[in-house]
Image (cartoon, helix red, strand yellow):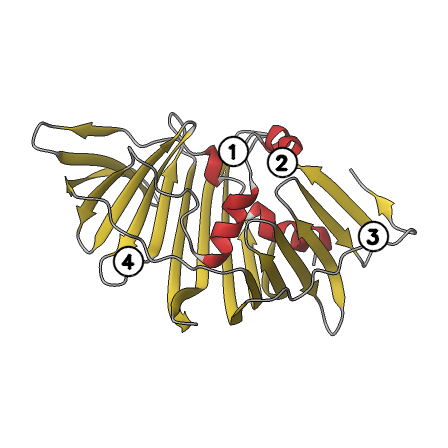
Amino acid sequence: MNNRMMMWLMATSMMWLTACHKNKIAKNTKQVIVDSVAVTEPDSKKYSIAVAEVVEPVKINEVAFDYLTAKSKVSFESDKQNFDNTNVNIRMKKDSLIWISVTGVGFEVARGLITPDSIVFMDKFHKQYFVFTYEQLSKKYNFELNFALLQSVIVGNLPFPAQPGDRFTKQDNFFVLSQDKGRIGVNNYVAEDNKKLTKLNARENGTNNTFALEYTDFRSINDLLFPFTSLVMLNVKSLQDGKPANTKITLKHSRVDIQAESPGFPFSVPSGYTRKL
């Protein structure tokens, strides 16, 4: 297994969300929204039309926390590499820190610390470490990555908080929050029964790049509903050769604890480690 890939997993799971643009939307004077959503099938591409009625803003049920810890397993499937059920321990301080420990058979192989300013990972197996700013990553991968986005994926909250001017519609058993964030357009599907974000679709205008996120297995943690399974599906063009690249990432929590006090975030790079670019 590629240890560097494991270290990058929690960050790269959200890299492509911000490479998506807004779906084309038409609205008539009766406040009926018509969304054109592309559905890719094995041998063809079809476009389905969904009609939705504009509704008043909905209060979304989100996870409030100061500190959070989780024991999880991550699976990764792409055209070039696959691995299943890699053990990951996560510690978080809301809006400040995400601490990640990746373990192999009985020992830690990698540790990461993600802050609003930078991402640092240690490869303990090869005694190497990596330091990146979000600006560097955005330039290298042609996407816009930020701390809030990564935090939201782990806990199941909205990646982008609802703002005045965002639009709510009703489609089947979901309230759909549609957001335009400059380069991207996002449709957040909020379940009617529990008001939780259940899935998210994003699309890049003018390309076939898509991002989909689904949350399942909701359980009660301190009277808050928390998704214990997250599925990320990416369908993007490679920056190197322009060919389609498909990626599927599954994050399954076995335990989640919301805490009032810091669990600790031990992180220091030993002097003998080599910095890699």
Q: Residue furthest front?
A: 260
Residue at 43% across / 56% down in the picture?
A: 156
Q: Amino acid at mark 3?
A: Val
Q: Earlier in the sequence, mark 3 or mark 1?
A: 1
Q: Nearer the viewer, residue 218 or 74?
A: 218
Q: Which mark is residue 269?
A: 3
Q: Which mark is residue 134?
A: 2
Residue at 46% across / 52% down in the picture?
A: 232
Q: Amino acid at mark 4?
A: Lys
Give me the C-alpha separation between circle 2 and circle 1: 25 Å
| The C terminus lies in quadrant | top right
Give me the C-alpha separation between circle 3 and circle 1: 37 Å
Give me the C-alpha separation between circle 4 and circle 1: 38 Å
Q: Amino acid at mark 1?
A: Lys
Give me the C-alpha separation between circle 2 and circle 3: 20 Å
Give residue 41's position: percent from left, percent from top: 32, 44
The residue labelled by disc 1 is 243
Classify mark 2: helix, strand or loop: helix
Q: Earlier in the sequence, mark 4 or mark 1?
A: 4
The residue labelled by disc 4 is 195
Classify mark 3: helix, strand or loop: loop
The answer to whether marks 3 and 1 mark residues whose Cβ atoms lie closer than 8 Å is no
Q: Residue furthest left?
A: 30
Whether residue 14 is visible here, answered yes or no, is: no
Q: Nearer the viewer, residue 91 or 249?
A: 91
Give residue 224's position: percent from left, percent from top: 39, 67
